[in-house]
Image (spheres, helix red, strand yellow):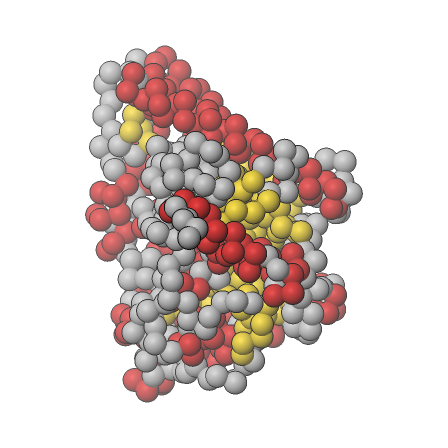
Amino acid sequence: MIKINKRSFALLLALLSLASITNPAKAGFDLVTLPGEKRVLSECPQEFQEQFASFFNNPCTSSLLLNKAAELQIPRCSDYKKGAPIDPTLPSSSVFVTYRENNEIFIEELAQEMEMEKGPTTLTIIVEHPKLAHFFASKRIQTLLHDEKKNSLIKVISTAASRSDPVDSWTQDKLHFAPDGKELSIYEMAQTDERKIANEEDKLSFLVGNSCELPVYRAKGMAPIEKARSGALAYGGNLMAMPGNFYITGVIPFNPKYENNMLGLVPVGRAGGNGGGGGGGALLVPGRVQRQDQKNYLTDRFHQMQITGLESEGHKVLKLDVSFLSVGHVDEMFSVVRTKGNAPCNLAILYASPEKAMAVMKKEYAQLLEQGAKDSRRCQYSAKFLMNEYENKNERIPDEVARYNQQNGCLFDEPIETLLTGEGKKFFRKNNEDIQKIITSNLFLLQEEMKRALKCPQIATVAIPVLYNKEGKSLLPNSVNGLVMTKPGEVSSKFIAAKTFYPPFEKSIEEDLQKLAVTYSSIQELSYHLSDGDVHCATKSLPLCLP
């Protein structure tokens, strides 16, 4: 009788799992529904018909934009392969956001910064059925809906009343839009977050597909409702389309020092990074990372299905190291914007930079010392206090908070003096130095791939000040995790990011982007930050291509 110990058995399971999800014959995506096939009701409830029915009937893509398609040279969906990445710096037809009872300031400021009427870009708001009354009763929401310049460009999608499971607020993670070779389609993401719903028809992908008349695809091997828990690597925030027709995604490079690691079989969600995003108990499987040293990498089963499906359709998927991040998404490190200059090289990679953040802080600290402010200041505003005192009441945080933070050298309730010089912050400083090395390595790989794909001698880069704590989360709202808006007919992008409440960081970003003719703005979203996401995580852009 052959005896198999636990480690050997676990290894066998991992290898069998990997074989089943990397078999090209079984890879790809299945069409699971066409618009109207499995009808999800997103209709205006009777009690709101008189005032608000039009917002449910508005299209996801404005007819005003479609009427300009020829002059704007909007590409055809048939020009792309199935599942192909669409350049995120091209104009979008809509931006999706999910309504929460404490994000009305966020929606209000987002609508203002989108400059929808100039696009014209639609703002599509997903509202859970039980929250409709609260949504329509809100004075801020009513003001937005009655704005004559914007109301024809606002669409409301309500979840089906039969759906008992709440819709997660991370709109980016749930939906991925890409052509299917004929028309724009939805590719399901973060599927196991909906494992508690009873009916497939109640899934968010079906809901949006019906409301926006888009077909829905699912990676081969995925069940209609996956009951198993997965890590966050299979979420939309960890799959970014890049100019040059390729994707980037985050994986965990193989490291024999990882606890319980055996050729890539480890629990997801280890504190302090190296876990790829929570999810307790999901298993990571081994793969191969496409980089110079050809190291092994780790990912979870659902994420590997997505990678294999995209690669089977002929799409490049560049794997980057997210081992230091708690959530483990590439959108916590990178964004890409369109700049002034000659196409196709008029682009810039925005990257999270602890090094830049420390440099800005050192400059500010030196000025505080000159002013004799070293021992006379206190940091009194924590992020949680500000959220509870203002944002949870749908109130705007006063401007004097940011002024106070600058005058007193505060990152919320953390003095920059302590972060820069404190004995107890040695690990913080060393950890951010190590994180910078990982990001720099990732940046090199991304920059080289864009140069190769676009045949550009150089791609500009912009360092965005971001600091990380020991858990692999951004210390302040993450300014690289932003929304890119490029209006039709305009040369360069607008970048909408989170307000950090530390003006020196935001001034640094604005000045660096202005040199490239990129407009920058920041909006309030502390409740998202304290839930481990920011502007990009909270929104999803609908790219534009013509059937």
Relative to 233, is 198 on the left or the right? left
- The image shows residue 542 at horizontal and vertical percentages of 56, 64
Q: In terms of depth relative to the viewer, which is nearer, 181 or 461?
A: 181
- The image shows residue 201 at horizontal and vertical percentages of 42, 79
Residue, x 52% and y 32% (percent of image)?
A: 438
Q: Quadrant of residue 498?
A: top left
Q: In terms of depth relative to the viewer, which is nearer, 418 or 118?
A: 418
Residue 257 visible in image: yes
- The image shows residue 72 at horizontal and vertical percentages of 71, 63
Residue, x 34% and y 83% (percent of image)?
A: 45
Relative to 438, is 326 on the left or the right? left
Which residue reaches farthest front? 1
Relative to 20, is 323 on the left or the right? left
Count of labels in the image = 0
- The image shows residue 338 at horizontal and vertical percentages of 64, 47
Residue, x 28% and y 62% (percent of image)?
A: 101
